[in-house]
Image (spheres, rainbow, N blue to C red):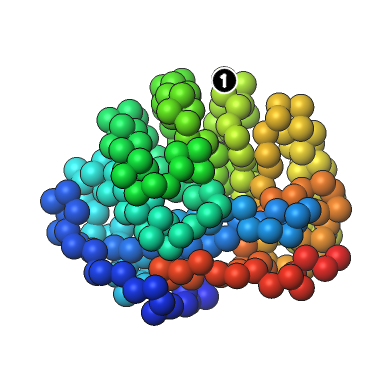
Amino acid sequence: MPPTHRNTEPSFDKPSAVRNLDFEFSFAFQPIVNARTQAVVSFEALVRGPGGEPSSEVFSKVHRGELHQFDQACQSKAIRMASRLNLQTQLNINLLPKSIFQNGQNIRDTLQVSLESGFPVENIVFEVSETSKLQDYRRMVAIFKTNREFGFKTAIDDFGMGYSGLLLLVEYQPNFIKLDRALIADIHQDNVRQTIVQAMGNICRQLDIDMMAEGVEKAEEYRWLHAAGVNLFQGYYFAEPTFEALADVPARVFIM
């Protein structure tokens, strides 16, 4: 993975231990763009070490019994940092699959953090990866519905490479699905991938779900997907994650 960029303005106090966690962490932010309007519509908060170290180093410090509190600490810190960065778009936050069933205990805390920081609840998008096998998807659906009642948006991440994506869509229609990189890699020269993505696009339009292509790395991938009707994109082709900062997306990347 390309290195993240450290930006010294604005500066942040080093995060101290949160909720009995004995390690520090921070975030990098990667933009999500709407190619039709050529605008950044969201930033995904990606866990990093306090000096920009990769997420793997952070997760290696999380003990099994700390997943729930770490998940809550991530939600709270990402929202507070987004507010301090004066983020005016949506904010995508990942929920840890192994702690998703405890999220009902977190939701009120997260709502309180949103209110205290002044970051709009309706601009927060919770992502759950489809690549992890969730034994009780109906329980997860109930949690998603509760989140929606509180005003939060939801997204299924890594869609197309997991166990339960289509089954989830039967029970619950999220605001967004994010097509996994494996589905869109070199799609401009792969008829099978093209057929699958076009079919998913038709399903999403019928269900009023916004479909996003993530992990876009090549101009050719972007151009084929955009021509096929995909408007939302994320990936290194547009911008890398930037440490404790909000990256600009150059206008040239949208040229067809």
Mark 1 surroundings: few (<14), some (14-19) or many (≥20) residues within 10 A: few
Would you say 49 lies left or right of 28 here?
A: left
Would you say 128 lies left or right of 107 here?
A: right
Would you say residue 127 is visible in this rendering? Answer: no
In percent of width and height, residue 192 lies at 80, 47
Vertically, is 247 above or below 228?
A: below
Q: Name the foreground residue: 157 vs 64.
A: 157
Q: What kind of element bears circle 1?
A: helix
Would you say 114 lies left or right of 163 here?
A: left
Would you say 152 lies left or right of 53 here?
A: right
- Residue at screen point 46% across, 69% down: 245
Looking at the rendered image, the quarter that the C terminus falls into is: bottom right
In percent of width and height, residue 237 lies at 67, 68
- Residue at screen point 33% across, 28% down: 104
Vertically, is 173 above or below 55?
A: above
Image-quadrant location for residue 110: top left
- Residue at screen point 74% across, 70% down: 251
Residue where numbered disc 1 is placed: 171
In percent of width and height, residue 21 lies at 17, 54
- Residue at screen point 38% across, 60% down: 84
Q: Name the foreground residue: 234 vs 179.
A: 234
Would you say residue 68 is visible in this rendering? Answer: yes
Q: The residue under label 1 is which amino acid type? A: Glu
Numbered marks: total: 1
In percent of width and height, residue 197 lies at 76, 44
Q: Name the foreground residue: 53 vs 29.
A: 29
